[in-house]
Structures are given as structure tokens and as C-alpha cells.
Image (cartoon, grey):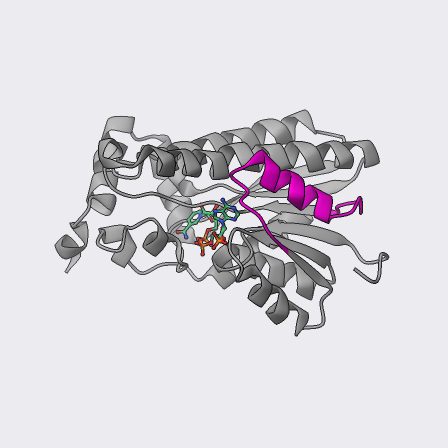
Amino acid sequence: MSTNSRPFAIVTGASTGIGYELARECAEHNYDLLIAADEARIDDAAASLRASGANVEAIEADLATLKGVDALVAAAKGRPVDALLANAGHGLGKAFLDQDFDEVRHVIDTNITGTIYLIQKIGRQMRARKSGRILITGSVAGYIPGTFHAVYNGTKAFIDSFSFALRAELKDSGVTVTCLMPGPTETEFFRRADMTDTSVGQSEKDDPVDVAKVGFEAMEKGDGEVVAGWKNKIETTIANVTPSGVLAEMHRKQAEPGSAKNTR
Ligand SMILES: NC(=O)c1ccc[n+]([C@@H]2O[C@H](COP(=O)([O-])OP(=O)(O)OC[C@H]3O[C@@H](n4cnc5c(N)ncnc54)[C@H](OP(=O)(O)O)[C@@H]3O)[C@@H](O)[C@H]2O)c1
């Protein structure tokens, strides 16, 4: 990182999808970047962001582990973090009882444990400096019991809730917490979650460029939340007044293996 007068952002899950676009937004807004993901192609993302003139360092780390998060924090080399965009996460489709528990645990450890461990480490530094922006990628999935995506939706319910609570704890501290809640977005998410045969997997989705833009803008303004897209705004409003059992049955239609054929 060459020019320390520029603001500095850490973006997790920045190799693809929403995280890559969040990193691009940061680069366009003059941030120096430290980006992280679990696979080596994070270096390709860094190279492509550098091509736009940004100062970018990349680290490959499994952020489901405390060791991986510690390695990411160490890679910042003590540089004050102006913005933390805690975005890394993944899903896992199919019925809970048919899932491999190691994979289940990896979802929880990535989406919850590693995410909040990182937020605690960087958040403490921000609170001490009385300055900082935290953007957490939650999901509209946090509003809905996720039949055939049960653990994932549970992790996002945790994250959405955690984000608002942390924001309230940090009121007047100089540190803001913003929850970005996308709906179905055109990324590698559904393929990786083995959900391409589902109705939601085959549906038309939001563009990660647009999702990242509204998320970044909300973070910069210090807003508490932003639901990306008008359809998702309506969905979360309806979800708030719909019984959980009804929502769970609605989710079945979206996420049951083989449900894609019902949409054609
Ligand atoms: N797409 C949607 O419909 C949608 C909707 C609502 C919320 N979200 C949330 O948006 C965030 C980004 O997802 P996306 O849709 O952009 O999917 P994506 O294209 O699959 O990107 C996920 C990113 O997270 C990284 N990641 C996953 N597990 C990791 C781990 N254990 N350690 C380090 N990096 C890890 C991936 O890196 P590697 O490739 O190196 O593993 C990748 O960079 C997630 O939190 C997801 O839950 C997505």
C-alpha cells in the first residue's frame, strides 16, 4: 500500500459476485484495498482491480476459521481500517437431514463465526479511533425460514439481527454499521450451493453491480440497512406480517430440489 493518505478498506469474499463489485466500488471511490477469499483466484480479482488504478493487496484465507481471520487482520499490517465490508458467505441447498455436517458447519463458520470474529477485531480498532464504517452482507433470506436452505437462512437471520444490535451498541461512537440485504442475485452463489435445479436458482436475478452500488452508498451514508431492489423491499415488508409456517411453505416452492421444472 503506497499512499496512506487514502482511505483503506477490507473487503471479504471479493473474488467474485457482490464482494468483487463492492471492492470495485471502493476502488472507484479512492480506497486502498485489502481483499480476501478462500481460493487463489482472489489474485485475479486483485489484478483486475489494480488495472483501474487502485492499490490492492490480496490474501487467500479460509474465513470460516479463526486462523484465517487472524491472517487477514495481520495482512492489514496495523493500518487503520476506514471501512470493513464483511461480505464472504455461502449457501448449501437440499434437505438439512441429507446434508454433510462438515459442509453445514462451514456455512455457519463462514457466515457467522468468522464474520463476527473479524468484525470484533476491526470494530475494536474503529471504536478506539472513534471512526469507521462497517458493511455486513446479510440477506432478505434472514426474514424467511429457508425450507431446503434452512441453515443458510438461519445464518442470515443471525447476521441481519446482529447487524442492527451492533449498530445500536455503537450509536454515537463514530462507527456505523450497515446491513446490506440482497435478494436473489446473479452470482456463483446458487451453483456453489448446489441449487441450480431449484426455482430460485433458475429465476431472473438482480445484477451484483446494482446490489453493490446501493450497499456501498448506504455504507458511505451510514444508513442502518438497505434492501437491494424494489421486489425485495416488498418481499421483506410482506414477510414481516406473514406467519412463519406460511413463509416456510413459500420457500419450499423456491428452493426444493427439482422445483425449477415447476417454473417452466
Ligand atoms: N447471490 C445471492 O442471491 C445473495 C443474496 C443475498 C445475500 N447474498 C450474500 O452475498 C455474499 C456474497 O455472495 P455472492 O452472491 O456474491 O456469491 P459468490 O459469487 O459465490 O461469492 C462469495 C464470495 O465469498 C467467498 N467465500 C465464501 N466462503 C469463504 C470462506 N470460508 N473464506 C473466504 N472466502 C469465502 C468466496 O471466495 P472463494 O471463491 O475463494 O470461496 C467468494 O469470493 C454472501 O454473504 C451471500 O450470502 C447473496
Residue 208 screen position, x and y as percent: 47, 60
Looking at this view, name the residue that lies furthest to the bottom: 51
In the rendered view, tell whether residue 209 sits above or below residue 101: below
Viewer-nearest residue: 68 or 96? 68
In the rendered view, tell whether residue 64 sits above or below residue 203: above
**In which quarter of the view is residue 104 placed?**
top left
Magenta span includes 64: yes
Q: Is residue 124 left or right of residue 143?
A: right
Q: Which residues are magenta?
A: 59-82
The number of numbered badges drawn on the structure is 0
Residue 70 screen position, x and y as percent: 66, 38
Residue lying at 36% horizontally and 59% vertically, measured from the top left:
205
Instruction: Specify whether residue 249 is in view.
Output: yes
Q: Is residue 147 left or right of residue 38?
A: left
Residue lying at 71% horizontally and 67% vertically, measured from the top left:
54
In the rendered view, tell whether residue 35 sits above or below residue 46: above
Q: Is residue 202 left or right of residue 115?
A: left
Residue 79 screen position, x and y as percent: 80, 47
In the rendered view, tell whether residue 70 sits above or below residue 20: above
Residue lying at 29% horizontally and 50% vertically, measured from the top left:
194
Give the quadrant of the N terminus.
Answer: bottom right
Viewer-nearest residue: 138 or 120? 120
Magenta span includes 119: no
Residue 64 screen position, x and y as percent: 51, 39
Residue lying at 74% horizontally and 42% vertically, measured from the top left:
132
Instruction: Specify whether residue 174 is in view.
Output: no
Give the quadrant of the C terminus.
Answer: bottom left
**In which quarter of the view is residue 68 placed?**
top right
